[in-house]
Image (cartoon, coloured by chain):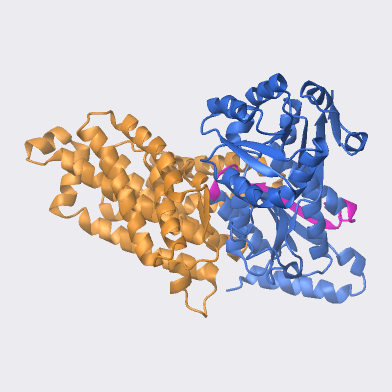
């Protein structure tokens, strides 16, 4: 089903290849096609990070890199169409940002290499079967937070903590996953979990209050209810001198003592490095899917003082950002 | 434009031609401004995805998804016919209610079907690549739907539905139960949309809660593009025009995606699509003026 035009084009390409067989450096133009489901500060940072990583590896757009980027502008049907276009263009790597875009691309091709990014659970999204090298055309970087690193931070903020409180919305699937994993993880670290449910945003304050005296520190995940009403948690933390540790860096500016969160630009750089490995000949199926390696530690010194915690110098030194 | 991109546009165009046929029935035949579509499309997708993920046969799952769409359309019509809620508001209420219902059905915002069997993976012959097989299977489904609709709207009952839309008072005088006809028509309309949703999740790798956004706009655009490219009065050509309109709309998006060579960027996509549609709508007008001048 080749059109006459493309036949002539391929003949032309063949002729050119025969004419300049030894100019391999110039011929090493690679192509990367990136797509995201929507324009969004975090997703745009991922894209910029990917580009930066490519640049650092010596791939400059317009020079030896053919870079194209499309967003679906929030429309899943358009995401599907972008996926088909990219697969048809046969780039050396497709970078798919966020779950719907990644699913559309993976559903469209079994041969073009795909590197996903900003996908929380690639296994649940069926992008890969497990965290081992996939053996097919898909690999990437997940933005899931590793809970053991989160709990290490809790230990570093409040070294003698044994009882960790958590406020969460039982109706939010992601939060339930965190609670279930913490129930298993904390005892192995010599700590216990004390739970307080906040089914609505207005319940967050009273749920936090119910934990006072029963816990040494309150940890929160990226639960939407809790993050929306973080100020009410802060109020309780200051009144009762209960230290707060969050998992998104934004909550630190709102009054948490510390959070080890994702810097989406660095996340993009990590995905970009995976893309570079594929560009340089590694098979995507031999690269295991990764979790975000670089987390950024944000610390709020005045919140620490208000919640009765003295931070160690070692902790302050490792912070990416300190808020006073 | 690559072959792959072309077949991708055809595939999505055919899926949306089912939506467009549904929109044609509600907006044109029944004259019922129905926004339920934004909810019944993801409803069909959600029901289908959940059932397949739980191990049900994809064909049966698709059928149930279609029936779920029909039920949603019926409820909208009942809100309007029996509870006397204004048609547009009734459909808006149903649309927003379906967002929560869809979340409940799915249990989480995203259900992948990448590793599950679908009607396409079952029907696809081994010698045919999937990107050609999918639009071919969809072509059969769409043509079947089109011819069934053509036949149905020529029967007594089908004509009664059409009469209800064009002149309800006259129809009632002729003994047509207009309320029942509206409910029936809306059920057929949203059944098609539910079917489209089920086809969509099986070709796109899964259901996502955000998949309903803007579906009605695409459906309406397809109907209007079809009507202006192929103006007709007979139901055979009317439905054909709608199918063609939906496919053309997706081709425009594919064209817009391939327009980077003239310096356009990712964020311009929706603008280019809009401009292309305007051009498609203006061409028949210019043609008309030119021929009229020649006759004068």
Q: Residue at x 82, y 69 (%)?
A: A281
Above or below: residue A53 compared with residue A309: below
For the record, the magenta segment spans A56-76
Q: Is residue A293 left or right of residue A86?
A: right
Left or right position of B73 against B122: left
- Image coords of residue B191 (percent x, y): 32, 52
Asked whether, in this view, residue A320 is left or right of residue B31, the answer is right
For the residue pair A320 and A147, the one nearer the viewer reads as: A147
Quadrant including the C terminus of chain A = top right
Residue sitting nearer the eye, A237 or B43: A237
Which percent across, then down, holds residue B140? 38, 66
Give the x, y percent position of residue A306: 78, 21
Q: Colour of chain A?
A: blue
Residue at the image position 86 percent from the left and 65 percent from the top: A28
Q: Say which quadrant the N terminus of chain A sits in.
A: bottom right
Towards the viewer: A85 or A196 = A196
Q: Would residue A238 be counted in the magenta stretch? A: no
Q: Is residue A146 left or right of residue B172?
A: right
The residue closer to the viewer here, B122 or B140, is B122
Chain ID, orange in image: B
Residue B150, how many percent across, how many down? 25, 57
- Answer with the quarter of the image where residue A217 lies: top right
Q: Is residue B116 above or below residue A63?
A: below
Q: Classify B165 as above or below B257.
A: above
Q: Quadrant of residue A245?
A: top right
Assess whether residue A65 is covered by the magenta stretch.
Answer: yes
- Residue B229 visible: no
């Amino acid at each position: 089903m080749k059109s006459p035009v493309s036949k002539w084009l391929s003949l032309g390409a063949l002729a050119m290849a025969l004419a300049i067989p030894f100019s391999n450096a110039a011929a090493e133009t690679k192509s990367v096609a990136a797509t995201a489901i929507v324009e969004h500060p975090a997703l745009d940072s991922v894209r910029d990070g990917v580009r930066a990583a490519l640049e650092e590896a010596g791939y400059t757009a317009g020079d030896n890199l053919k870079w194209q980027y499309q967003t679906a502008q929030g429309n899943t049907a358009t995401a599907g169409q972008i996926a088909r276009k990219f697969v048809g263009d046969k780039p050396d790597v497709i970078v798919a940002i966020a779950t719907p875009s990644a699913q559309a691309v993976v559903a469209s091709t079994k041969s073009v290499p795909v590197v996903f990014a900003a996908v929380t659970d690639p296994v649940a999204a069926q992008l890969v079967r497990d965290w081992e090298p996939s053996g097919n055309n898909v690999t990437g970087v997940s933005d899931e937070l590793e809970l053991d690193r989160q709990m290490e931070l809790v230990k570093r903020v409040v070294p003698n903590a044994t009882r960790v409180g958590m406020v969460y919305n039982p109706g939010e699937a992601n939060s339930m996953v965190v609670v279930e994993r913490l129930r298993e993880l904390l005892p192995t670290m010599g700590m216990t979990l004390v739970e307080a449910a906040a089914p609505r945003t207005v319940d967050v304050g009273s749920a936090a209050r119910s934990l006072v005296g029963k816990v040494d520190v309150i940890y929160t995940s990226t639960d939407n209810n809790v993050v929306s009403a973080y100020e009410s948690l802060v109020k309780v933390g200051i009144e009762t001198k209960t230290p707060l540790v969050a998992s998104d860096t934004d909550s630190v500016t709102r009054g948490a003592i510390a959070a080890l969160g994702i810097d989406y630009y660095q996340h993009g750089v990590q995905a970009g490095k995976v893309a570079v490995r594929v560009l340089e000949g590694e098979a995507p199926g031999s690269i295991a899917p990764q979790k975000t390696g670089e987390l950024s530690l944000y610390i709020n010194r005045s919140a620490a003082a208000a919640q009765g915690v003295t931070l160690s110098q070692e902790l302050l030194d490792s912070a990416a950002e300190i808020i006073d | 434009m690559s072959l792959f991109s072309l077949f991708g546009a055809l595939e999505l165009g055919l899926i949306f031609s089912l939506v467009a046929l549904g929109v044609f029935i509600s907006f044109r035949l029944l004259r019922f401004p129905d926004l339920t579509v934004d909810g019944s499309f993801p409803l069909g997708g959600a029901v289908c995805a959940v059932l397949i993920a739980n191990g049900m046969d994809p064909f049966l799952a698709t059928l149930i998804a279609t029936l779920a769409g029909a039920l949603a359309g019926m409820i909208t019509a009942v809100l309007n016919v029996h509870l006397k809620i204004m048609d547009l508001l009734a459909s808006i209420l149903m649309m927003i209610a379906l967002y929560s219902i869809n979340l409940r059905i799915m249990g989480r915002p995203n259900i992948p079907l990448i590793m599950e069997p679908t009607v396409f993976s079952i029907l696809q012959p081994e010698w045919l690549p999937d990107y050609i097989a999918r639009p071919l299977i969809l072509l059969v489904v769409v043509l079947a739907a089109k011819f069934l609709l053509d036949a149905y709207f020529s029967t007594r009952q089908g004509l009664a539905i059409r009469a209800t839309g064009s002149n309800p008072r006259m129809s009632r005088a002729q003994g047509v139960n207009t309320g029942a006809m509206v409910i029936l028509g809306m059920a057929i309309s949203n059944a098609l949309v539910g079917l489209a949703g089920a086809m969509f999740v099986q070709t796109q790798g899964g259901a996502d809660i955000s998949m309903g956004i803007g579906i009605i706009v695409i459906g309406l655009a397809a109907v209007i593009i079809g009507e202006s490219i192929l103006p007709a009065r007979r139901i055979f050509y009317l439905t054909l025009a709608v199918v063609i309109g939906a496919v053309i709309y997706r081709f425009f998006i594919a064209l817009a995606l391939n327009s980077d060579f003239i310096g356009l960027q990712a964020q311009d996509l929706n603008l280019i699509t809009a401009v292309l549609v305007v051009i498609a709508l203006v061409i028949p007008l210019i043609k008309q003026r030119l021929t009229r001048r020649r006759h004068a």
